[in-house]
Image: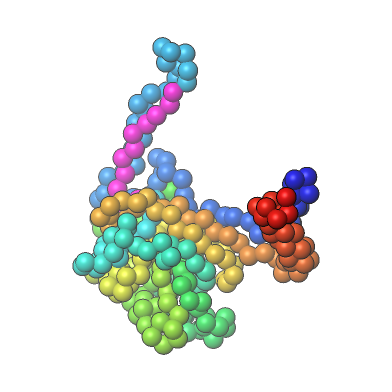
């Protein structure tokens, strides 16, 4: 048992040394939570907070917010008739490899710029294929305005004139067709703005195209400047709202191990895994007792 404890301790140490770590890609819900214009804002009401008459601390709240508030998922049913609701999205599509396509340079010159089909094909030429089961995230740099409604939605947002970047219908069609062309499926698409479609859109064609193909959207994604172009893995954890068209979502990214750390610790990982399996076999097999 002592040897087993040592093996498990060393295993944890090796995982820490491997260089892999986690990153939040979502914003906390608070009074600055961005909500689509016209939707009710976030509200947190105190039910109880303090020591009660029995002498112990008790704290609780009620929360009110629109489905599409803060960092959230757009279920395919949001713009696709009879497509998946939040609770119907298969679990295997809520986790997968991430690729990041960066249009922040375009956005610095045009705040309503879009990821174009040409941008996607250029990315493919430079970086190779999109992995099967991938979640494509688009870095626009717009996240720096999150929390400031006027900057995030545009100075004339109250009149319905929205200003922010997005993803073009042409790029959306490429993501939908990618499985037919390569055998690799794109399961989700997200970005660091209020909407998959850019601000001036009136018919939300990108939403429609992706939703009809049962590809979900992720909006108001945080910390995209810290995500590498390839190699990370993402777990998408929406609130499981039955019949929901969207839901607040926790996004947990696993950043890739550094190649140097990985090469150094892999032999140790192999040895420790084999050792642990051997010890478990001894403990559970009566022949060794």
Instruction: Specify whether residue 65 is painted magenta.
Output: yes
58 or 25: nearer the viewer: 58
Res. 104 visible in picture: no
Residue at image coords 47%, 49%: 27
Q: Is residue 32 left or right of residue 67?
A: right
Question: In the image, is 283 to the left or to the right of 215?
Answer: right
Q: Residue at x 63, y 56 (%)?
A: 21
Viewer-closest of 81 and 203: 81
Q: Which residue is outermost to the front?
A: 287
Give the image location of residue 122, x and y in percent: 51, 84
Quadrant assignment for the N terminus? top right
* Residue 45 rendering spot, x and y as whole percentages: 34, 31
Residue at x 47% of width, y 72% of height:
134
For the image shown, how many numbered marks are present on the structure? 0
Q: Which residues are magenta?
A: 58-69
- Seen in the picture, residue 150 relative to 92 is either above or below; the reply is above
Percent of width and height locating residue 195:
35, 62
Residue at 73% of width from left, 65% of height from top?
Answer: 270
Residue 225 belongs to magenta span:
no
Residue 262: quadrant of the picture: bottom right
**Colour style of the rendered protein structure:** rainbow
Q: Looking at the image, can residue 127 be seen?
A: yes
Position of residue 55 relative to residue 91, above or below, is above
Q: Is residue 138 above or below residue 119?
A: above
The location of residue 214, given as percent across then percent down, is 32, 70
Q: Quadrant of residue 155?
A: bottom left
């Amino acid at each position: 048992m002592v040897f087993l404890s040592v093996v498990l301790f060393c295993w944890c140490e090796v995982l820490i040394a491997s260089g892999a770590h986690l990153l939040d890609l979502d914003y906390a819900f608070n009074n600055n939570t961005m909500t689509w214009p016209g939707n009710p804002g976030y509200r947190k009401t105190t039910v109880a907070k303090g020591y009660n008459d029995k002498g112990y601390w008790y704290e609780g709240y009620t929360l009110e917010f629109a489905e599409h508030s803060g960092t959230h998922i757009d279920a395919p049913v949001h713009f696709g008739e009879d497509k998946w609701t939040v609770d119907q999205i298969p679990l295997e599509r809520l986790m997968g490899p991430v690729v990041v396509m960066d249009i922040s340079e375009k956005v610095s010159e045009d705040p309503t710029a879009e990821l174009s089909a040409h941008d996607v094909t250029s990315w493919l030429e430079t970086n190779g294929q999109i992995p099967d089961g991938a979640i494509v995230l688009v870095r626009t740099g717009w996240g720096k305005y999150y929390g400031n409604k006027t900057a995030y939605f545009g100075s004339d947002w109250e009149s319905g004139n929205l200003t922010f970047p997005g993803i073009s219908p042409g790029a959306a069609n490429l993501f939908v067709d990618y499985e037919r062309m390569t055998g690799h499926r794109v399961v989700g698409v997200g970005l660091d703005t209020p909407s998959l479609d850019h601000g001036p859109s009136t018919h939300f064609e990108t939403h429609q195209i992706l939703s009809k193909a049962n590809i979900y959207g992720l909006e108001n994604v945080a910390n995209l400047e810290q995500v590498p172009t390839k190699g990370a893995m993402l777990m998408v954890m929406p609130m499981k709202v039955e019949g929901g068209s969207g839901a607040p979502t926790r996004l947990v990214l696993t950043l890739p191990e550094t190649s140097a750390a990985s090469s150094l610790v892999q032999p140790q990982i192999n040895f420790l895994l084999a050792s642990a399996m051997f010890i478990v076999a001894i403990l559970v097999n009566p022949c060794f007792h």
